[in-house]
Image: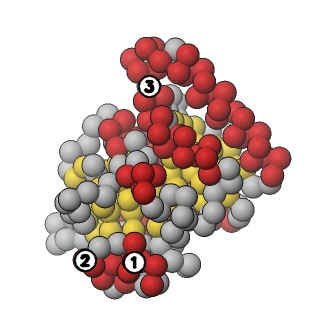
Amino acid sequence: MTTINDPSTTAVLIGHTNDPDPVPVYWDPSRDGHISVEGELAAGRSTTATKIAAAFLSGQPNPRVIVFTQSRTPYVPFLVHDPRVTLATTRRQTDDAIQAIQAELDSRYEHIDRTLAHPADRILVIVDGDRAPNPSFFKNILRIGRSAGIHLLRVHHHDPDFAYGEARYNFGTNVHLRDTTETAKLLYDEQLATAVAELPHGKAIVVPAPGPEKPCTIINPEEI
């Protein structure tokens, strides 16, 4: 689950609590696996994702980031000139990137003992959009990517392939931005639905994977 004030060697700072004495909030890829950013249109999903990706790049040894998006614009200020980042915005680029990730996944599982012993070269795969290209491929990363050091950051607004059922439980950390839609009221429990509807712009709620307990932590993505 999301770690508060307990960073490990792989922990990524994703914000601070909105308290008089702010406490750092971390996402740890090695333990939490995958992370989602959800929110309504103009809630700041892509901006939040770029800041998480920038923190990932600054805190991991030999990291790589692959971004699947239809718009380069939100990612330009932080990532587009970084040689460790690949942007896939066209159909050809998307197909090529998926093939490259699959080859990397196959290679790492072929040598899984070595991968588990030295998972330093982590890859963050960002899928930004309300519907993912080739959702079965990315859902497979959700199932088996963590042990291979390949982590999914899903940026969306209730994509049915990821917002419900088993897929939702595979995200170790969920970052919720403002959401006043009726879908949020159906998808979230009453406490979370009320909280996200009242969020101001630039604030978020971080929730561990769905389960009996859902502690929420307010963060400010602008401070990442």
The residue labelled by disc 2 is 191
- In this figure, which residue is indicated by the disc labeled 1? 186
> Do tag 3 and tag 2 residues touch (Cβ < 8 Å)?
no
Secondary structure of the residue carrying tag 1 is helix
At a point 83% along the width and 47% down the height, the residue shown is 92
| Mark 3 residue crowding within 10 angstroms, few (<14) / some (14–19) / many (20+) | some
* Nearest-to-viewer mark from 1 and 3: 1
Q: Label 2's element?
A: helix
- Residue type for callout 1: Leu
Left or right of 200, for residue 162 = right
Q: Which mark is residue 66?
A: none
The answer for how far apart the CA atoms under marks 3 and 2 are is 37 Å
Point out the frontmost of discs 3 and 2.
Answer: 2
Q: Residue at x 16, y 66 (%)?
A: 21
- Kindly report which numbered mark, 2 or 1, lies closer to the viewer in this rendering: 1
Above/below status of 60 relative to 208: above
Q: Residue at x 40, y 48 (%)?
A: 170
> Residue 142: horizontal and vertical position, in percent?
48, 43
Quick check: 74 above or below 5?
below
Task: Name the kind of residue labelled 3 in the image.
Answer: Pro
Residue 51 in the image, given as x and y percentages of width and height: 48, 58
Query: What is the distance, in whole Å, between disc 1 and disc 3 at their CAs?
Result: 38 Å
Q: Which amino acid type corresponds to the residue marked 2 in the rendered image?
A: Gln
Residue that mark 3 sits on: 119
Alpha carbon distance from label 2 to label 1: 12 Å
Q: Secondary structure at mark 3?
A: loop
Quadrant housing residue 216: bottom left
> Earlier along the polypeptide chain: callout 1 or callout 3?
3
Choose between 130 and 87: the one closer to the eye.
130
> Residue, x 43% and y 30% (percent of image)?
147
Q: Is residue 86 above or below residue 50?
A: above
